Amino acid sequence: MVWKSISLILLLVNWSISQLANMSEEEFLMNNRQIQQSPVIKKVSWSSAESIIRKAKGKGNDGSDNWPVTWADDDNLYTAYGDGYGFDPIVPHKLGLGFARVRGLPEDFTGENIPSDAENTGMGAAGKKASGLLMVDGILYMLARNADNNGHHSQLAWSKDYAKTWTWADWKFEEFGYMTFINFGKNYTGVPERHRDFVYMVSHDNPSAYESSDRFILARVSRERVTERNAYQFFSDDGWTTDIQKRSGIFTNPQRCRRSGISYNAGLKRYLWWQQDRVDDADTRFKGGFGIYDAPEPWGPWTLVYHTTNWDVGPGETGCFPTKWMSEDGKTCYLVFSGNDNFSVRKVMFDIMGF
């Protein structure tokens, strides 16, 4: 079968920054006629701003960001933070990369910092930071950005002792600056049968974690060969290929593709993709926007669930929906995001078509 690249052209023409900042979802759709509204999710309802749970506040306003999340075989969530002090009790020195375990339910959880040999003190682009975490068959995998310690490239590492010690791959993805895994259920269960033999990841198509690109790409690798660079395949217009130069985009948004987080909602049988959307140089800890898109397959077709350029609170630079914290029917989820430089959690409810 020949897979056709899904191209969602989201170019916003002749709009000023001030107009973008106040664009409603209806206006977004009107000005991006090639993207369709989700055929499954008809409405998104957020809990109040006052209900947001914020932890890992650090010292003053100097908290921690990043927070990719995966559901491990011990029933805990594992996460990583950047440029901060982690959860209380905070670590003695600010880390460029640190790790933590999250126990409990979304409205009653605790975070525990994990001492690790992969910690570093490189701040910002000068230190490796986790852009993706995934547990598969008891092994915790990490995709780290800033692999050159200068804001570029991605590198794989893996841990067999819950983030305490890591082995680093002796190769890098020099083409991609912010790769992240597609997360499924506990210890990589709950994967649709047709995808069960593979691990999937996405990235904006730019070697820098700090620059935008025109599109996102999709890659996969056998779950038995995650550590082998020559086993990776890339989605292309002509099917899966091992030739990285033949990769094609699965989502196009000229100069607006940035950081993202993606997970599978088993209740809805839809992939949920959080994508950062910056229209100015505002500090996203306190101001900014994002889009949420859904699709029946990792390659699409991607449709719009929610979009804002000016959320009622700062969205931070990354967000994701942990699969452990999804209701069985998929209608209630919790967004983990780095707003305020915290581990921030906000409830979201999806109204479904036909209900």
Image: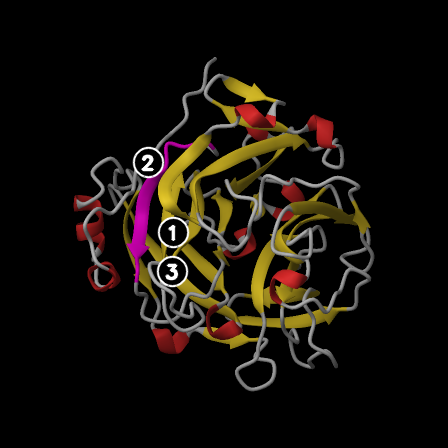
User: Which residue lies under the disc numbered 2?
Assistant: 8
Instruction: Judge the density around disc 2: few (<14), some (14-19), many (≥20) Cα neighbours within 10 Å.
Output: many
Mark 3 or 2, nearer chain start: 2
Asked whether 303 or 18 is in front, the reply is 18
Q: 276 left or right of 162?
A: left
User: Which residue lies under the disc numbered 3?
Assistant: 348
In magenta stretch: residue 307: yes
Q: Amino acid at mark 3?
A: Val
Mark 3 or 1, nearer chain start: 1
Foreground label between 3 and 2: 2
Between the residue at mark 3 and the residue at mark 2, the CA separation in whole angstroms equals 25 Å
Between the residue at mark 3 and the residue at mark 1, the CA separation in whole angstroms equals 8 Å
Residue occupying the far top of the picture: 1
Return the x and y of residue 102 as percentages of the image width and height.
Answer: 64, 65
In magenta stretch: residue 152: no
Q: Is residue 336 above or below residue 8?
A: below
Asked whether 128 or 58 is in front, the reply is 128
Residue 173 occupies quadrant: top right
Return the x and y of residue 8 as percentages of the image width and height.
Answer: 33, 36
Q: Amino acid at mark 2?
A: Leu
Between the residue at mark 1 and the residue at mark 2, the CA separation in whole angstroms equals 25 Å
Instruction: Judge the density around disc 1: few (<14), some (14-19), many (≥20) Cα neighbours within 10 Å.
Output: some
- Tell me the magenta residue range: 299-309
Q: Is residue 30 above or below residue 332?
A: above
Instruction: Judge the density around disc 3: few (<14), some (14-19), many (≥20) Cα neighbours within 10 Å.
Output: some
Which quadrant, please, contains the C terminus? top left
Q: 4 left or right of 93?
A: left
Residue at screen point 35% across, 57% down: 349
Residue at screen point 71% across, 45% down: 156
**Snapshot colouring:** secondary structure
Return the x and y of residue 225 as percentages of the image width and height.
Answer: 74, 31
Which mark, by number, is residue 331? 1
